[in-house]
Amino acid sequence: MMMMTSRWSKNNRASVDERRAVFHRYGQLSASSRHDDEDRQMVADPLIWLQKYTKTKDSHWREAGALSPYRPFPNKAYFRPMVEVFQKEPVLFVEKSRDMMISWLFVGLFTHAAMTTPGIEVVFQSQKEEKAFELVDYAKILCEQQDQRLRRAYPLKSRIQARGTLEFAHGSRVIGIPGGGDQIRSYHPWGLFQDEAASMPEAGESYNHAVPVCQKIVVVSSAGPGWFADFVNDCP
């Protein structure tokens, strides 16, 4: 039988420098473990992450008298119920008005999911490609403005990213695509966010293509006739 023994013993004592090196390494490992726990706590709740550990960009910051365009995500009473339903339900349809910040909330929730879950794909779809790219740009701002430790814990694939794409080093990505029934067929996403679905003539076709592959679908729109209104009104 072979017994494993320490290389340091009564007859072979560690030098002061060796002991210091061990204590230093142990301290690094302990600190790293504590930081990992703290990082996980900062992203454990996506709404707390949005409101405390990153910032959003307000294009009307001067009118509001703010010192910077980058401000914490607002705290509205209906955000928490929205987050809980998002986490619970695989498919969610939401009627909204312009000033509710519902679109930005769901961009944040999907961005948080992509950032904290390796190897998933999220698609943002809007009527025009430029609008879909704006949603991805907002996701990029949330990643850029978040706590520095989180930027290190969840690094991007590269500093320079293609317009309309947000890619993480662990393989997840967020992609913006224009409206069109066949647009989503080029992807195999974990999640789909359709913004202003009432303005997309083929939103229903995109939705139908997404249902078999997506684990999370959110469809959002302000009032307007069409597939979205018909679908919502037909729901029990």
Image (cartoon, rainbow, N blue to C red):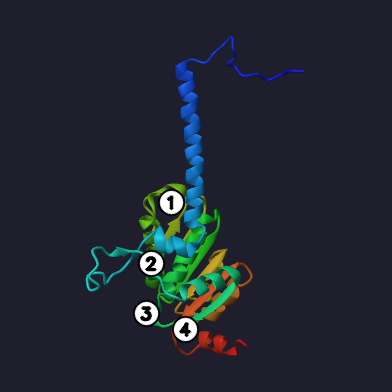
Q: Position of residue 183 (x, y in %)?
A: 51, 71
Secondary element under disc 1, as helix, strand or loop, is helix
Secondary element under disc 3, as helix, strand or loop, is helix
Query: Which residue occupies 45% across, 65% down?
Result: 108
Q: Position of residue 141 (x, y in %)?
A: 36, 60
Nearest the eye: 171 or 77: 77
Residue type (three-letter) at the residue carrying disc 2: Phe
Q: Residues within 10 Å of mark 2 (few under 14, many from 20)?
A: many
Disc 1 to disc 2, C-alpha distance: 17 Å
Query: Which residue occupies 44% across, 79% down?
Result: 196
Label pair 3/1, CB-CB below 8 angstroms = no
Residue type (three-letter) at the residue carrying disc 4: Ala
Q: Which of disc 1 and disc 3 is earlier in sequence? A: 3
Can you tell which quarter of the image residue 90 is in? bottom right
Residue type (three-letter) at the residue carrying disc 1: Leu
Q: Which of disc 2 and disc 3 is earlier in sequence? A: 2
156 shown above or below 225: above
Residue underneath mark 3:
99
Residue 177 seen from this side: no
187 shown above or below 11: below
Can you tell which quarter of the image residue 164 is in? bottom left
Q: Residues within 10 Å of mark 4 (few under 14, many from 20)?
A: many
